[in-house]
Amino acid sequence: MKFEPQEIVIEGEWKSIGPDGGDMHFVYVTKNQVLFASHGFGGVWRSTDLGEHWELIYNPEWIDLNFQSMSEADGVLFAGGNYGIWKSEDDGKTWTRVITGNKDLDSSPSKYEVVSIIALSRTHIYFSVKIDKGALLKGFKVVKHGFFELKDGKLKFYELPEGASVYVVVMLAYDQDFNGRNLMFVSSSESGLYTYDFSTGRWEKILDKKTTRVALDYENNYVYVGTIGDWYYRGKLVGGKWSWEHITVPGKTCPVAGFIVPDPYNPERLWFGTETGVRGSLYRTGSKERQVATFIGVGFWKNGKWYDLRINPGWAPTVAIVKHKKGEDKSNYIIETEYGIGARIAFVPRPAKSNIQKTEDGGKTWKRSYNGIYADTINKITLIETGLRKGDIVVTCVSGTQVTKDLGESWEEGIDFTIGDIGYGLPGYAWGAVSPSEKLEGKYDLLVATGYPPSYFTGNGVYAVNTEALKMGLKKDALKRIVKGPCYDLVIVGDTLYVGRMDSGVSVVNLKTYSVSELSGIPPDEAGMNVKYYDGMLIVFTIKGGNKDIDSYFFADSRTTGGIYVFVNNTCRTIYKGKRVINVALHGDEMVALTVDGKIVHFTNFVKDWEVKLPSAIYSDMAVDWNNRVVFLSTFDEDTPGVLYGDLDNLKTTGLKPLEGILTRRVRCLLLVDNYLFAGTEGHSVWRFKITKVVKHVITYTLTLVSSKMSANVGDVVMLSGKISPSTSGVVKIFLSINGSDFKEIGSTILSNDRYTFKYTPQAPGTYVFKAKCFSFQDEFLAESNEVTLTISRKPTEEKIKPKILISVDKKKVKVREPVTITGTILPSIPKIDVIIVINGPKGTFTHSITATNG
């Protein structure tokens, strides 16, 4: 995306403010008990107190960067993910990029994701990769089916003897003395488990399954590996041949058996986890079923049976098991059972509200451990403008809804809820929120809309929320559905609730009786999804089309259409039809709209007067600072900065500039409150930008004026024209001075492609002096032209010819019916003309017409 030079500069600072939670996919603990957590949408968090508190590692280069693998050697941490390989020499406080020499791996973001890494020393690592999804969508298909070695800056690739698809995932485990052999274990999700013998340079396939993560019991020379759909296997070399034991979990189904690792305190005790193969997983099963049962488990595997087996639901792609540090008392880190000892403390990444879970009793129970991990996906950020909770900001997230009363400095205790099945089936995403002027039924002080996606859930609607009950931990009377169906925006005017629906139209709800009617005037095939109330008017902007099972369809699908409807005194006025409008901003008699095809459209008194086509990107939302006339735009586009801004009145001239500092390009929504800009993201929760200064540089415009004539006669048409630079839009007013009089405005015209024309017809002779002035559509003066002088004269007149007509008769006196000849001459001679002879007689006047020739 190309950005033009910016004439406006905004100063301030971004801050990640929460809420906490969100899907998590990776966790790792170092020998020094420093924890790291990350997930697929980007972000790496660090904890130095065993998960009590976490902090985002802020690195301006880490835009949507994630970690998927880590290893350590000689005091150096190595990490790999979607931005190649990084290393840290200060326990992960700061990181530097490891340049491998492979351009596809060293790019930002990388075309590969580093999914497994093994560090042997500061200068010697092994790693494996999979093709990045984004690169694959852009056509990159160079498969690396095997593993890399980076030693002393030199890169080497070891390729498996079988081919694979672009979706293959390769995992590694290494033992330089596995039964006396120097072996790399290479697990392919498509080809199975191989070993590579560094001594002989030979590959050997040792398990023909679709295998996942591989781990080693170095003490007993066992190899453990998971599979796609066939649980786990433990292998051992017996008499030079591999012997395998199938490890299953009774009473459970196996989508993806992601990992199985020996307990660091007791190799007979095994930790294992499963994944969905759809969501939150590196692996794909081919199934589209999202509600897949997954779990984390730990138990003793002895003689083909489980003992002291502990199972906890929820996906578990990895596990981080904590060991005591050198000099610490080991007893603080172990549990004792009748089957032996085992690790007491471990962490596992989980979906949504579970995020990072911690066990302190060896896997029997798990608790939340993600204070400070702001990794949620935000649906909508709503400022409550009226009612009991006026001034609060409600943030609806995929994993729950929270409220801040102090612009994001803190989150209201006891309010962190999801809306489940209360008798109508599950609802979809939570969207807009409002607060009534008094508690409904004496209980409910908050209303929350739920809707698509997915399209098939039956529990959607508007839910009344009793926040006091939530704070007290009560489920009874905490929630009540008052409107059914998929809903998005909510507006309260008096005792009436207007509900922007995601299926069709707008619902009108009486908050005293909960009776529902429909707002008339909106076409039934359009969903009145967005509703705003401004200065006594209800503004509705609709959507038609789009995939309702995708949570970005209302801003990302350029095929969607819709309209803008204004309701005043129950009268509907259509002011726009066309591409879907994502959001509007209103101020005085102005309205600005952002459309799904990337246009800013400006209206004055609800009449469109200009539009600007924005640079190509997926725009998700808009906010306008009317005091400084700055427009903010969010994008959901991997090739575009997440938040942009520009001069509203000069977008065409000055373009857009990134509001740098936010570590994601996946921004879904915006909210501007005073000098705080809030950005709701996918996977990074809410970021807040505090605007400390807005600097607007003066733009110097040049306006020209030329005339089609330098002199003319009264009544002639004179064409005035000119152009303005740099490029902008606006109104050109034409002024005229006649014979030294004061200049007066005589008309105006609109700039078109930076040019204008104006026609003028002088009505009197004299000296005419013209000049032009250009104004923005907000009547801001931009430029004045040069003066053009014209001399206007009277038209020359031709002398009129007054011909003389001489006639005679051949007789002076005649009888009745006697013929008379009349002859005549016209002077000067005229070639041909009609002549009328008038005869007066006793019986009246008679005429006779003839044609005279040559006089």
Image (spheres, helix red, strand yellow):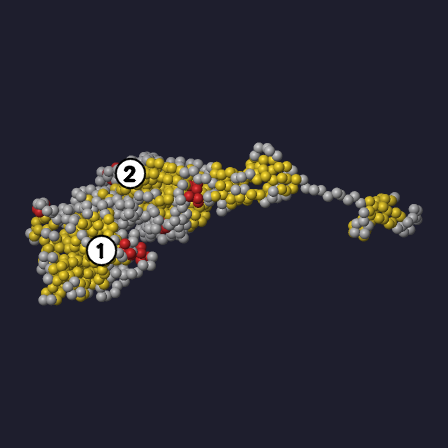
Q: At x 91% / y 51%, what residue is drawn?
A: 818
What amino acid is labelled 2 in the image?
Gly
Observer able to see residue 612? yes
Residue reaching furthest left?
338
Find residue 815 and report its horizontal and vertical position in percent.
Answer: 93, 49
Please name whichever residue, 713 or 385, is drawn nearer the observer in this view of the structure.
713
Horizontal relation, residue 825 to residue 578: left or right:
right
**On the image, numbered disc 2 is attached to which residue?**
408
What amino acid is labelled 1 in the image?
Gly
Total marks drawn? 2
Q: Nearer the viewer, mark 1 or mark 2?
A: 1
* Disc 2 residue crowd, few under 14, some 14–19, many 20+, Cα 10 Å: many
Q: At x 17% / y 60%, what residue is drawn?
A: 184
Observer able to see residue 67? no
Q: At x 63% / y 37%, what residue is drawn?
A: 766
Please name whichever residue, 413 or 96, is drawn nearer the observer in this view of the structure.
96
Label 2 sits on a secondary structure element that is loop
Label 1 sits on a secondary structure element that is loop
Q: Is residue 583 above or below residue 201?
A: above
Horizontal relation, residue 516 to residue 685: left or right:
right
**On the image, numbered disc 1 is attached to which residue?**
153
Q: Is residue 172 above or below residue 350?
A: below
Q: Earlier in the sequence, mark 1 or mark 2?
A: 1
Q: CA distance from mark 1 to mark 2?
A: 46 Å
Q: At x 86% / y 49%, what residue is drawn?
A: 823
